[in-house]
Image (cartoon, rainbow, N blue to C red):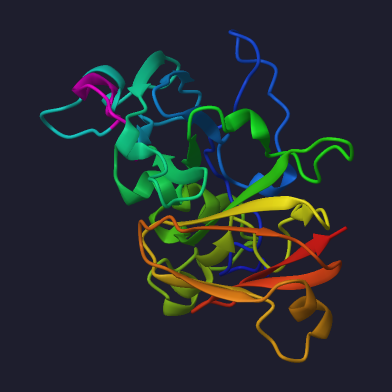
Amino acid sequence: MQSGQRIGHVYKKAMFREFIDDSFQAQAKRPEWLGMLGPIIRAEVGDTVRVVFRNMASHNHSMHPHGFRYTKANEGLASPEQDFGGNSVPPNTTWTYTWQVPERSGPGPMDPPSLAWTYHSDVAGAQDVYSGLVGASIVYRPGELAKHTLDVPAPPLSNLTEEVLTLFLIVDENRSYYINENALTKTNITEGELQVNRLDPGFIASNMKHGINGRLFGNLMGLNLTTGRNARWHVVSLKDSLVASFGADDSEAIARRCYEQSHSTLAWQHPDMGWTESGCGWFPYRLRASIEHQLIIFR
């Protein structure tokens, strides 16, 4: 709740967004369930990925991909010895990243047809991520990408596998680029009050946001899957070791009839799940070791 010493539910963020024109004016359509995440970068083993990155934020940023192969200029990882090329892109400038998708990035012989990775800005390490600059990529076996769709529910007459991805992340807004601005502009300090106490343990705790795709308190919409259709569910995590729980409460009979599984994900780990949904209804999707949960609907 917003107050004189609390920021509330609105924070300034910098986020990756996809555009359909080279003037960066028209944003591409995106699945609702992406929440805070940047666009899903999809590729097959053997592909070359090119991303035209325009920095429209107020600090130097980059795109550092996990799982891909790249040259040093395209790594997106800044350091005192490595501030050239795409490793630290200044505001209002553009860099085109070129990444290769090697066989090791894709599914192995015993793996499902696609695997997920993350990407994020890495000029100032965790500060970039906590400011909002994080997304994911999915790597497919050759010939599999066209068989999957991120638009769920899928068209009724198609034979596409529905595919969604959720990122578990505890966002520490205290370490965001924008914490000072948020503390000054997003609180309702009245005349005569003291300024926000940044060292107050309660203030610090209030800025630890336990979220799924950056959304809190059941506000991640669009996780609607179709009964009888194959589905792929990617679970990724950054920096936190957490547990995903699907309908694990014994009192939720409808949820358990649809699907029940708990899955542990360690920091930087990207487990994947696949199934064919046989029941309809709803179930809660929980982030354990946290207070966050979302709602999934099968139609």
Please identify the quadrant where the C terminus is shown: bottom right
Compared to residue 100, the image places residue 149 above or below, namely: below
Is residue 237 one of those drawn in magenta?
Answer: no
Q: Quadrant of residue 78?
A: top left
- Which residue, as the protein is rendered here, is positioned at the far left? 81
Q: Image check: 142 left or right of 247? A: left
Q: Which SS type dominates the magenta stretch?
A: loop
> Closer to the camera, 174 or 61?
61
Task: Check the image and name the residue furthest to the bottom.
Answer: 251
Q: Vertically, is 130 above or below 62?
A: below
* Residue at the (68%, 23%) spot, across then down: 27
Where residue 288 sits in the image (x, y, percent)? 53, 77
| Quarter occupied by the N terminus | bottom right
Q: Residue at x 78, y 85 (%)?
A: 252
User: In the drawing, does residue 32 fall left or right of residue 63?
Assistant: right
Q: Furthest-front residue in view?
A: 109
Query: Does 79 sit left or right of 260 as displayed?
Result: left
Instruction: Report which quarter residue 188 is drawn in.
Output: bottom right
Q: Please state the extent of the stretch shown in magenta in the rendering.
A: 66-76
Whether residue 91 is visible, yes or no, is yes
Q: Position of residue 19 (x, y in %)?
A: 63, 20
The residue at the point 42 percent across, 43 percent down is 107
Q: Is residue 194 above or below residue 145?
A: below
Image point (53%, 65%), residue name = 209
Q: Is residue 177 visible?
A: no
Residue 84, x across and y down, in percent: 21, 19
On the image, the x and y values in percent for residue 3 come to 65, 69
